[in-house]
Amino acid sequence: MKRVLTIVLGLTCLAVNAQKKWSLRECVDYATEHNLQVIQNEYSKQVQDLNLKIAKKNYLPSVSANVGNTVSFGQTSFGTGSLRNDRFSNSANLGADILVFNYGRLEKTVRKTEFDVEASQYDIETIKNDISLQIAQQYLTTLLNKEIVKISQAAVENAQKQYDRSKITTEVGTTAQTVLAEAEAGLAREKQNLKTAEINVGRSLFALAQLLQLQEYKDFDVEDVNIPDQLTPQLKEVDEVLATAYENQPQIKAVESRIRSAVAQTEINKTAFWPTVTASVGIGSFYNNLLNTNNTAGSSLFYVREQGFFSQYKDNFGQQAAISLNIPIFNKGITKLQIEQSRLNENIAKVTMQQQKQIIRENVQKAQFDVDANYEIYLSAVQAEKSTKLALDFADKSYAAGRSTIYDVNIARNNYANAQGSVAQAKYNYVFSLKLLNFYAGIPLSL
């Protein structure tokens, strides 16, 4: 019984997951969290964070210790003769050094690294924005295809009614067999259009699932969002949107940080012209043992009385302190060339800023143009839909009165279905262009 209950609960969870429909906000949040490009750039950001920590650690002194052991064998010369000198020595030292003056190189390096960290963070936000816009466009495409399915379903229902009516009139002999054949063909065409529309929904859902990088996509679906039929025109001016975009878009902020980083690098390179002052302190001791002395023989000629290890370390213990000054005089002109390189990098970053602003300006202008154009297209499509609906009503009444053929009805129905599709297409094109323009104006994506 317990096992059966576990299986039932598992199947229930699978059913709940299968029935889940994703909102636009859920799609955007999931993509920005799991997208591999975002994850890769987050790792790059972490590398920059570590670089900043390393730069700040350079303020601290460096402390090191070393222990050495040496064994030597051979003769040592003195005067006109030589003496056997086999020796073992041991030494231990502990030292610390700290940078006292380098014309602010450490501070400037920290500042430059901070700008690099900022740029990395803005790069992540830029990628997230790009992914969000792609998802929003594909999400709206999916909603459009779903609406076309509804239009196709309505067309199939009308064609089915036409076929049923034609079948009855043909069987009683009031209409020719060709009328039934045409009604059947019209119904088949509408069913084919419906199947194509349903496949397009599946294709757009698959494309959206790929953008989300989902492994399981067969049960993936999105929420049905009610887009109002009465759309209002956009009232924002391009200059107002541009001012907001220049101030808030992360790609602009990233370039600004890189310009400041390039300027800081130039200042860092200039410090190479200045002297460097370093202070150091240390302690240490050593031990020596002559290996060729005859300390056990009876002859006192070769007897050397050596102190023990700890006694020598105590007697030989010493301390030192030093301040060193390193004055650069000539390094082949490399410093000057490095300064020229960093200034060129400043110019490159400034040109990149102009390019990014130009891209944003073009995108905003295009979005504004699309908003205006798509709204006009939407108004004309709505008017065309009303006209074709009126024409279809007249065709139905005329056919019922025997004054027109079924061909006229099918043509009118096809025209009306096409007009409905045009309205849906224009509506969603307008909504996306409006969302894009609002995005540059600082308004988050939502439906």
Image (cartoon, rainbow, N blue to C red):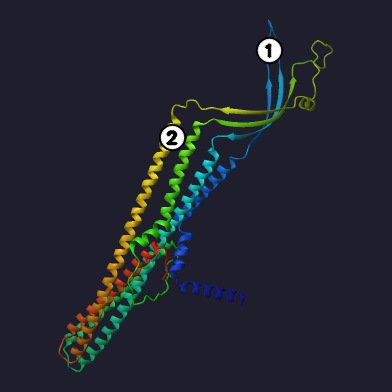
Asked which secondary structure carries label 2, the reply is: helix
Amino acid at dot 2 = Gln
Report whether 343 appears left or right of 372: right
Numbered disc 1: secondary structure: strand
What is the crowding at mark 1: few (fewer than 14 residues within 10 Å), some, or many (at least 20)? few
Q: Is residue 320 shown above or below 263?
A: above
Question: Which residue matches tag 2?
Answer: 338
Q: Residue at horizontal 54%, vertical 35%?
A: 103
**Placement of the N terminus among the 4 image quadrants:** bottom right
Q: Residue at x 68, y 30 (%)?
A: 282
- The kind of residue tagged 1 is Thr
| Picture quarter with the C terminus | bottom left
Which residue occupies the foreground of this view, 227 or 37?
227
Looking at the image, the residue that sits furthest to the left is 403
Reading the image, the residue beneath label 1 is 76
Would you identify the image quadrant in which residue 219 lies? bottom left
Q: Residues within 10 Å of mark 2 (few under 14, many from 20)?
A: some
